[in-house]
Amino acid sequence: MRKPIIAGNWKANLTLREAATLIHQLKGSCDTDAADVVVCPPFTALAAVAPLLKGSRIALGAQDVFWEAAGAFTGEVTPPMLVDVGCRYAIVGHSERRTQFGESDEVVRRKLQAALAHGLTPIVCIGETLAQREAAQTLDVLTRQLDGALGGSPPDICRRLILAYEPVWAIGTGKHATPEQAQEAHRAIRQWVADRCGPEAGAAIRIQYGGSVTAANAAGLLQQPDVDGALVGGASLKAEAFGAIIKAAAGTGAASPP
């Protein structure tokens, strides 16, 4: 049985004071063992948020990670730095990194490998643009991105990460994939994992949906058999909305298929 995982990507938002306020609000609504909960503040807030999470069920994650452990890489944050501050997860290959900062599949591969090498669980994002969806290229794009990030890796790598299907056209736009569209993509991703890493890995890997997830649409998405959680953007900045999404995930956790 796959335990749902809800991760909040705060992106470039919140000062230290605002971050602390949000964490205090969230701690009351995240007290569930039916779903894993992660918050991913900006780098500047990680050290301040980490001690506030002690004793709670909320884990700390980073929004990105560099592919080297140390060195002359101005502006980068390395895996040991993230582990040292208390991170357990790191988002890798988010569409905003791919489209706005030119990250390639090879960069995504290097980052996820670095994260794994230092004990972080990477949340690896993949997804198509609107033009690609309209051209019926969604599954081809997902396959290319999966091959680029994971192809050729040992089969056990699929047991050590989380995948996130994030259609680019749904991120920050207010649009979201229908439950049926999300399920189709997630089913194809799971089949890719089963084909490359074995049926047990395919059945076990958790695949989140990301893209304008809200309290209003979360339940419909999370009820799909191959949707194992959500990577939440704007709604994760509001304690009530994020708490509602977590409750929706917790409510589907017991019914999630193997």
Image (cartoon, rainbow, N blue to C red):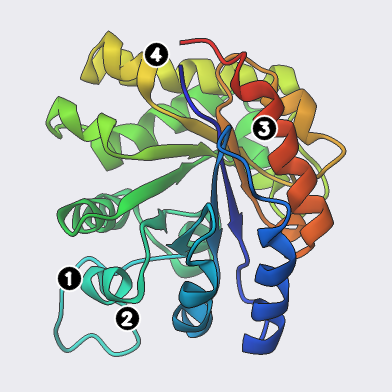
Q: Contact, CB < 8 Å: mark 2 with mark 1?
A: yes
Q: Which mark is residue 68?
A: 1
Query: Gap in Å between the C-alphas at discs 4 and 2?
Result: 35 Å
The amino acid type found where label 3 is placed reads Ala
If you read the primary sequence from the N terminus, does the residue marked by circle 4 or circle 1 appear first?
1
If you read the primary sequence from the N terminus, does the residue marked by circle 3 or circle 2 appear first?
2
If you read the primary sequence from the N terminus, does the residue marked by circle 1 or circle 3 appear first?
1
Q: Residues within 10 Å of mark 4 (few under 14, many from 20)?
A: some
Vertical placement of residue 196 versus 13, above or below: above
The amino acid type found where label 2 is placed reads Glu
Q: Quadrant of residue 81?
A: bottom left
Vertical placement of residue 209 versus 110, above or below: above
Residue 53 in the image, given as x and y percentages of width and height: 52, 67
Q: Residue furthest right?
A: 216
Query: Gap in Å between the C-alphas at discs 4 and 3?
Result: 23 Å
Query: Gap in Å between the C-alphas at discs 4 and 1?
Result: 31 Å
Task: Identify residue for label 3.
Answer: 249
Task: Identify residue for label 2.
Answer: 76
Residue 46 in the image, given as x and y percentages of width and height: 47, 77
The amino acid type found where label 4 is placed reads Gln
> Could you tell me which secondary element the residue under label 4 belongs to?
helix
> Could you tell me which secondary element the residue under label 1 belongs to?
loop
Residue drawn at the location 46% of the way across and 73% of the way down: 50
Q: Residues within 10 Å of mark 3 (few under 14, many from 20)?
A: many
Query: Gap in Å between the C-alphas at discs 1 and 3?
Result: 35 Å
Residue drawn at the location 49% of the way across and 54% of the way down: 94
Q: Which mark is residue 191?
A: 4
The amino acid type found where label 1 is placed reads Glu
Camera sees residue 192? no
Q: Contact, CB < 8 Å: mark 4 with mark 1?
A: no
Quadrant housing the C terminus: top left
Q: Quadrant of residue 224?
A: top right
